[in-house]
Image (spheres, grey):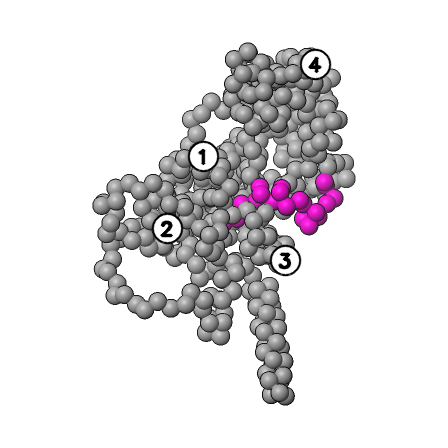
Amino acid sequence: MGTSRMFRIFLILGSAFMILLIIIYWDDVGALHLYLHTPVSPGPKTPHPPQQPRPQTSRTPSFLSDIDAFVNQFLEPGTGEPTDPVLAESTNQSEHAEERYVPRREWKIHLTPVAAELRERQEQRRRLLLEMCANDSVVFPGKNRSFDDIPNKELDHLIVDDRHGIIYCYVPKVACSNWKRIMIILSESLLQDSIPQRDPLAIPRELVHNSSMHFTFNKFWKRYGKFARHLMKVKLKKYTKFLFVRDPFVRLISAYRNKFEMRNEEFYRRFAQVMLRRYANQPTPPTSVDEAFALGLHPSFSHFIQYLLDPQTEKEMPFNEHWRQIQYDFVGHLETAEEDAEHLLRQLRVDNVVEFPTSHRNLTTSSWETDWFNTVPVEVRRELYKLYEPDFRLFGYDRPESLFNE
């Protein structure tokens, strides 16, 4: 009896010691180091001789034989999780039957430095962001809340690529579709004929915005449980964090065009019906977006602005932007998207893996502001600027004086 009791005591102590060792190793070495043992980027498709079948062994490696592999079990995507590869429809099966994907393990090495003006531009943007966040005159909702205070749902905007140590904070209507495509390519979460998809534009739009294609901070709870917040903070410290922004007023115009001038059932039910009832003298608006469009009913841009400024809107959906509690390593602007994208991919050393897609769509530009705000009274424009002034100042956009001098 005594021997059995001592054995259980030693077993418990030994387990506790192993867990403590993992935590110490994890924090000291850092999450980024752990991924130096994982595939870094896709390599060329090369034929390989068939391998001799080997007896199957357990997927769980021995802790004593390989501590890196053991810890990686908790950091790398696992079976059935959101970042597991998704098989696209197979095409040209016979053509690729003999091919096997072999990942490349080296980072891209450049012999020449990034242009000095691009480095200086990034330094200015990061410095401005830090200065404005520390400036007491710049006030916005949630400014003083910590990362721990961010609701879990807002963490869905932070997309993680563990293969390359990247965190992307996506902002809607700021090239987020193409950057989501880039993140799918880098994380290799979409397979074509058992080979990771490498062409961003070949990814269907319905998959781009499918939450199952992206591993976000909000999904950490499912995988890591009570260790989720700690691991988020480790990755925020070690990984490269980036976001893209644009002129706040131009972004509003783009959002209105995309969500209310086009048929969008979700946005019609959640927002358009409310606007029609409140501001368009439509007490019983149509129940569907198709009915509304058939009758020529949709909120005007002026209604949209009224809704944003309505105190009731703030009560129902507070403007707590999710990106304001994070210190970013790279801040891109949509106005310089192609230069910034090339710079960022090179800084991440993945420009040999993927290129940012060139957009030929009809983009909303700042030159359209006067026409769009023509139906909005000047005093309302000034009120709207007060709401978005922190965004103008944080990211270095000029105050649109021409809109306020009429």
Region rendered in magenta: 142-161
Q: Are marks 1 and 4 in contact (CB under 8 Å)?
A: no
Secondary element type, mark 2 = loop
The residue depicted at 60 percent of the width and 25 percent of the height is 269
Secondary element type, mark 4 = loop
Q: Are marks 3 and 2 in contact (CB under 8 Å)?
A: no
Question: Which picture quadrant has residue 92?
Answer: top left
- The CA span between labels 2 and 1 is 24 Å
- Residue position marked by numbered label 1 in the rendering: 206
Pick out the residue farthest to the bottom.
2
Mark sitting earlier along the chain (3/2): 2
The residue depicted at 51 percent of the width and 64 percent of the height is 71
Secondary element type, mark 3 = helix
- Residue position marked by numbered label 2 in the rendering: 42
- Residue position marked by numbered label 4 in the rendering: 377
- The CA span between labels 3 and 2 is 33 Å
